[in-house]
Image (cartoon, rainbow, N blue to C red):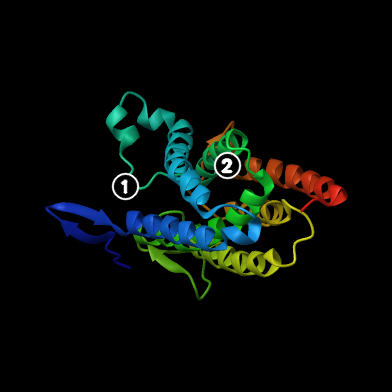
Amino acid sequence: MNINPIAFTILNVEVRWYGVLIGAAMLIGVFLCYFRADKFDIEKEKVLDICMFSLPAAIIGARVWYVAFNYDYYHGSIIDMLNVRHGGLAFHGGLIFAVVTALFLCHRWKMGTWNLLDLAAPAVALGQAIGRWGNFFNQEAHGGPTNLPWAIEVGGEMVHPTFLYESIWCLLLFIFLMWLSNRRSFSGQIFLLYVMLYSIERFFVEWLRTDSLLIFGFKTAQLVSIIAIIVSIFLYYRRRKQNVI
């Protein structure tokens, strides 16, 4: 399968589908949060202010995470570390950096932290559903060989389209979280369910991937997923007991 990763060229600069889709995912996420902010008692302008800091933090975090776990490859080349045009962004790093930045701003501006996280969770899930297709155009984030009818060809071999598995799951997760947003019984419920359900999917899909980041021989994404599942379940029941909106 010959997939052209270049979307278009401007002044001899190639713009990749990966960047186009990531950019589109972020933009759609911002609009979604902006127009739903009132439902969570958050000022629309504050949503834009937080996005202005959190989105760049997400990109930085995604790249730092990826480079950190591939340091042997990037060691000694600052230019290669900074070059994200060929992919190399790790979602967990981006999410952690973005959430930490948002939490800091919420504390500084005295905003409802859990309400903001609940507002953002569906947008993040939708962004993942869109952004994962960037992996398709880059022919990355795929699984091992398979004979399943929905396999895709990469390098002359039929493999699991793990990017597609995650995209479909995140789209369904987005629909579920949007439905639940009007029925939430406590603040933090939407975000914690997002973390819990996404982490469950990521843990199992990671078994199939062939390009996983490793730490001490273990797949980093699986370790992070296990921790995220445990912490989110604990906080979910704690928040539900407090029953605070």
Please identify the residue farthest to the top as the structure is shown.
Answer: 76
Disc ID at residue 99: 2
Residue 238 placement, left or right of 110: right
Q: Where is residue 138, by image quadrant?
A: bottom left
Identity of the amino acid at label 1? Answer: His
Give the vertical position of 230 relative to 76 (above or below): below
Q: Where is residue 215, by image quadrant?
A: top right
Residue 88 placement, left or right of 206: left
Please identify the residue farthest to the left as the structure is shown.
Answer: 11
Instruction: Provide residue 2's location: percent of width, then percent of height.
Output: 29, 66
CA neighbours of label 1 inside 10 A, class few (<14), some (14 to 19), many (20+): few
Disc ID at residue 86: 1
- Residue in view at x 43 percent, y 44 percent: 52
Q: Earlier in the sequence, mark 1 or mark 2?
A: 1
Instruction: Provide residue 223's location: percent of width, then percent of height.
Output: 65, 40
- Residue in view at x 51 percent, y 50 percent: 47
Residue 197 placement, left or right of 75: right
- Residue in view at x 80 percent, y 47 percent: 239
CA neighbours of label 2 inside 10 A, class few (<14), some (14 to 19), many (20+): some
Q: Is residue 184 visible?
A: yes
Give the vertical position of 34 relative to 91 (above or below): below
- Disc 1 to disc 2: CB gap under 8 Å: no
Identity of the amino acid at label 2? Answer: Val
